[in-house]
Image (cartoon, rainbow, N blue to C red):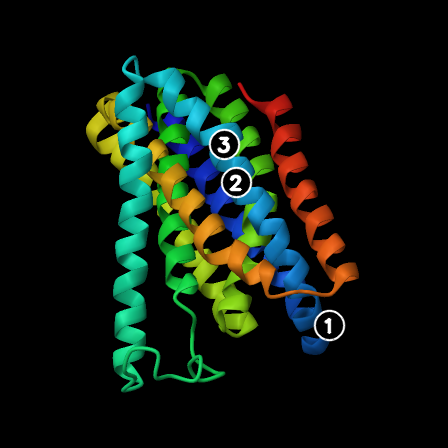
């Protein structure tokens, strides 16, 4: 059991450090990074829609016999993130003493509500990954290793997208990197939960997966797609569309590594 725990926690720590992939952006010129963010936001749209529809939702349906429960928790996820964003926007407006429609689109240095939404949704997603890794290692070390590899391959495009969205939300590169890393470390908490409560935690995984899928659908559709519509230039719009397709394509390609 000690060997299993060592393997499990080593794996989940490696997965958490994948969040530091955004560190390469620290060496990039800020002007170049700002020009590239509109494409990275488009990549995130494809990745979030793709992850929710290609991976999370089918996985939740495959684990629960009653499909209505999955549908219910997807909707609960969407509504929960709607409420959370409403609360964040209310706090943001209140903090700037704005009345309804009375603000000039907030201050340029203000953090957009999508920043905390990304941190919350990614934290939940990583927590679920930690549970899945822990449960896999309790089954066997071989299955645990295979699961870890699949999650690592899945996390790379996800973490790049998350880092870009935190930059887009108004965080500095250093702060975005730090917040992304803290969010990623919730995977370790997920694995701890498994070793404390055992495989019984696996029964809650499908519900959390469905909830996370709803959050991803909300963020992509409600926050990111409207951002894409702000670009009217034909060349940039075509680049955005191509990048969305690339994000979806990456999620389809990752099906090859599903267990």
Tell me which residue sits at (31%, 75%) in the image: 92
Most extreme residue toward the top is 65
Mark 2 and mark 1 residues within 8 Å of each other at the beta carbon? no
224 vs 31: above or below: above
Q: Residue 99: image x %, image y %?
A: 27, 82
Task: Looking at the image, tell me whether mark 2 or mark 1 is earlier in sequence order.
Answer: 1
Residue wearing tag 2: 49
Q: Depth-wise, is mark 2 or mark 1 nearer the camera?
A: 2
Q: Quadrant of residue 163?
A: bottom right
Tell me which residue sits at (52%, 56%) in the image: 224
Residue wearing tag 1: 32
Element at badge 3?
A: helix
- Report the side of 141 relative to 157 (left or right): left
Mark 2 and mark 3 residues within 8 Å of each other at the beta carbon? yes
Residue 148 visible to the viewer: no
Tell me which residue sits at (27%, 30%) in the image: 72
Residue 147 visible to the viewer: yes
Element at badge 2?
A: helix
Q: Residue 54: image x %, image y %?
A: 53, 29
- Nearer to us in this view, 79 or 15: 79
Q: Which mark is residue 53?
A: 3
Q: Depth-wise, is mark 3 or mark 1 nearer the camera?
A: 3
């Amino acid at each position: 059991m000690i060997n299993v725990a060592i393997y499990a926690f080593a794996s989940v720590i490696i997965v958490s450090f994948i969040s530091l992939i955004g560190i390469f952006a620290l060496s990039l010129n800020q002007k170049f990074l700002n020009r590239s963010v509109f494409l990275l936001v488009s990549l995130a749209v494809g990745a979030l829609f793709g992850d929710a529809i290609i991976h999370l939702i089918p996985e939740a349906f495959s684990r629960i016999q009653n499909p209505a429960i999955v549908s219910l928790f997807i909707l609960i996820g969407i509504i929960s993130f709607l409420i959370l964003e409403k609360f964040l926007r209310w706090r943001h407006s209140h903090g700037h003493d704005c009345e309804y429609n009375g603000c000039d689109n907030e201050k340029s240095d203000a953090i957009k509500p999508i920043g905390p939404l990304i941190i919350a949704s990614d934290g939940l997603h990583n927590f679920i990954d930690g549970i899945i890794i822990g449960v896999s290692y309790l089954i066997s070390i071989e299955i645990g290793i295979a699961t870890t590899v699949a999650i690592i391959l899945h996390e790379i495009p996800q973490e790049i997208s998350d880092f870009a969205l935190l930059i887009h939300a108004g965080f500095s590169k250093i702060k975005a990197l730090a917040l992304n890393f803290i969010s990623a470390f919730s995977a370790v908490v997920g694995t701890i939960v498994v070793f404390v409560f055992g495989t019984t935690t696996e029964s809650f995984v499908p519900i959390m997966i469905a909830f996370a899928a709803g959050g991803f659908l909300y963020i992509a559709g409600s926050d990111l797609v409207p951002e894409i519509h702000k670009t009217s230039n034909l060349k940039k719009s075509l680049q955005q569309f191509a990048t969305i397709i690339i994000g979806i394509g990456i999620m389809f390609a990752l099906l090859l590594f599903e267990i």
